[in-house]
Amino acid sequence: MVSVLTQNFDNTRSYKNFIKIIIPYLFGENFSTKIKWGIAFFSFVASIALGLGVPLILKWIVNALSNTETQSFQILFFLVLIYGTGWFLNQAMINLRGILMWPIGERAVKNICLDIFSHLLRLSANFHLNRQTGMVTSAIEKIQNNFIDSFFGFLFLIIPTVIELFLAAFILWYFYGFWYGFILLVMFIAFMFVSIKGNEWSLFARAESNKAHAHSSAAFLDILLNYTTVKYFNNEEHEYNRCNKILTTREKLISKAVIHSELARVLQLLTVGAGLTTLMLLASYEGLQGNINISDFILINAYVLQFITPLSLFGLIFSNSLQAFVNI
């Protein structure tokens, strides 16, 4: 494969260009790989449909229990069976995507690393004579450790959550009025604003910490590679003090990056908590006024609970995906 990774290297900080570069590695020329992508896309759509349908089935179960005149065990058994099967299939689709896509991601990592290695071998002798071996190996290690998170995190976790949330807002608006869908959308827009601004703040610190980490790796490895020279000139104490200074800088920058990331995540959780509380207060008030019944309240609550975990993880996944991209 021709090394597309080394083309336009200065532009790879753009996520758009990054995606263009890695697509040939992910899809390849193997027909079986394209079949796996097709099955993964089907599981993607099915997971969204099941995620939206399961709370509706729960509403029907509650209605069946509330209506004692037409209560039938056969109907309840059938609804509960559908509910349990739908929940299982929804969760299984996530695992199916992992089974299909993880090997594809690892093969892409292998091909990228091989292309990098091939590119390094084609470089001039001057580059290798003045090399910083530790920095080169650190860069390859970051690709191996962060490639899958940077791409699959967005593709199979963030995008489905966004689509499902918008569809859930439409369902709430259709059944219960404008304000339910509006509150859910405002909560998500505010969440995205906080996520983007918070990650802009934290990713700058992450980029600085990555530089310090790469610098420390390069210093350690280069000292070990030149061990005989260090011993010959009796420079052990000087090299020790130099490494101590480099590691102190690394310690401060990595700690700063982690603190910034965690503070951004706290703001994300605060936004989600405020939005979900507002939504449930509205549903409670409507219930007391008799505008909605218990099954409606449970349906709204089911959608709320369904998005608590994805949205709380959304910020972490969003941050980790961007950090993985910065690491690469």
Image (cartoon, rainbow, N blue to C red):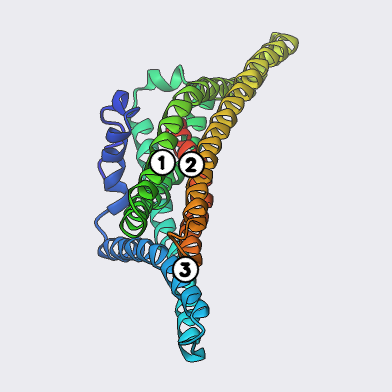
Give the CA separation, mark 2 to mark 1.
8 Å
* Amino acid type at image mark 3: Ala
**Nearest the eye: 137 or 90:** 90
**Nearest the eye: 299 or 223:** 299
Give the CA separation, mark 2 to mark 3.
29 Å
Residue 225 can be seen in this image: no
> Which marked residue is nearer to the observer: mark 2 or mark 3?
2
Q: Which residue is mark 2?
A: 275
Number of marks: 3
Numbered tag placed on residue 188 in the rendering:
1
Q: Position of residue 30 (x, y in %)?
A: 27, 60
- At 30% from the left edge and 31% from the top edge, which residue is drawn? 6
Q: Which residue is mark 3?
A: 92
First in sequence, mark 2 or 1: give its number: 1
Q: Position of residue 38 (x, y in %)?
A: 28, 63
* Amino acid type at image mark 2: Gly
Q: In the rendered view, does 305 fall on the left or right side of 157?
A: right
Give the CA separation, mark 1 to mark 3.
26 Å
* Amino acid type at image mark 1: Phe
Q: Is residue 156 above or below residue 68?
A: above
> Which marked residue is nearer to the observer: mark 2 or mark 1?
2
